[in-house]
Amino acid sequence: MVSVSHSSAKEFINYLRFLHENPISSIQSGPNKEFQKIHEEKIKKLNQSNEHQNVSSSHNHIAKELWESLRGILPSQIVDDLSGVIAVGALDNMSVNALCAKSVDGYIAVLINTGLMTLLNKLSKMQIASTRPGSIRYCNRAQPEDISVATLKKWNLEVCEHYRHTGKPLGPQIHLHSDAEGMHATQLNIWEMYVLSHEIGHILCGHLDSSKFVTKNPLFGMIETLEENKSHEMESEADFIGYILLREYYHKGSIRKSPNNESIKDDRGLVSILITFYNLLYLLGASESTTHPHPLDRLCNIVLNAYGEKVAETLADSYDNHGLLIKLFERPLVVKNMAIEGILSNAE
């Protein structure tokens, strides 16, 4: 593969988009008129509530907004180092969920698959609806009052199975009522931010700078690992750093106070959303491979490093005994490894 020079990160990311473009629009069914009308009403309300800002629903806009939000919690030294070097956006290619790549000029591109973003949007709506009966406002497959939890679970498996075999994010088109819509928006935002945080984790860990980890794939320009054990080590590092970034993002502006007026970060809400994310990876066919550990191992490794062995064991055992989830969340989850609190500040 011939090396191509670029004059900016924006030029590099546009080059990757052009090289790998395979629009999902060519295989997606378009929304019907009723679905589209409700969608346009939501966008109009968002524009009105954001001081006339132009709110776009494009995947590329979402990816850029995620990066701008994440930049806000990074140490200033890291922001300075990445300034002008990195570009983040969406990629219309069903062959990869997310990737980060580095050009011969040192520019970095992080891309998230539009198909994955569409898929997560669908699955989050169904997951929220299954826990909140009556929260569906519209569905193109059935009247809201006729949709049971069993039906939603069936559709969830259908969507995952289809995506696993074809890479196409097809499935029911659903709108939720406003209260459930807020829960969905929060969960989806955390899922998408974790995908981005994981890729940024690779960058902060120096994986793009090590010949042990990186090789250029002539088809996709993706990172490839050279040794299985190194690959698992790399993914675990990116998972954990990604989680630290996600945790800082999640708690920004929402730190609670303990009875003695000390700041406390209760991570139960975040961990529950992370559990649903890794459960989805499993349903989508992810398993242990030469490049990635098993989704459950990845999840438990994060929990082990953040909250200790006892919590990680309870989480692992809960997959055989669901009643243990109640025990896991019966009291606040606070990090056991206090060094975690200083990882980002130490990066300065």
Image: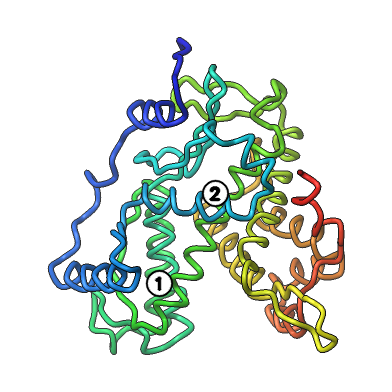
Q: Nearer the viewer, mark 2 or mark 1?
A: 2
Q: Secondary structure at mark 1?
A: helix
Compared to residue 41, the image places residue 286 above or below, namely: above
Q: Position of residue 25 (x, y in %)?
A: 24, 47
Asked whether disc 2 touches disc 1, contact meaning CB atoms under 8 Å apart, the reply is: no
Q: Position of residue 56 (x, y in %)?
A: 30, 57
The tag on residue 196 is 2
Direction from residue 60 to residue 74 in the image, left or right: right
Which is more N-terminal, label 1 or label 2?
A: 1
Residue at point 43% right, 26% down? 12
Pick the residue in front: 267 or 173: 267
Please rate how many residues cluster around mark 1, counting C-alpha atoms within 10 Å: few if below 14, some from 14 to 19, many from 20: many
- Tell me the residue that label 1 is attached to: 125
Q: Quadrant of residue 303?
A: bottom right
Q: Quadrant of residue 52?
A: bottom left
Compared to residue 223, the image places residue 144 above or below, namely: below
Residue at point 80% right, 65% down? 312
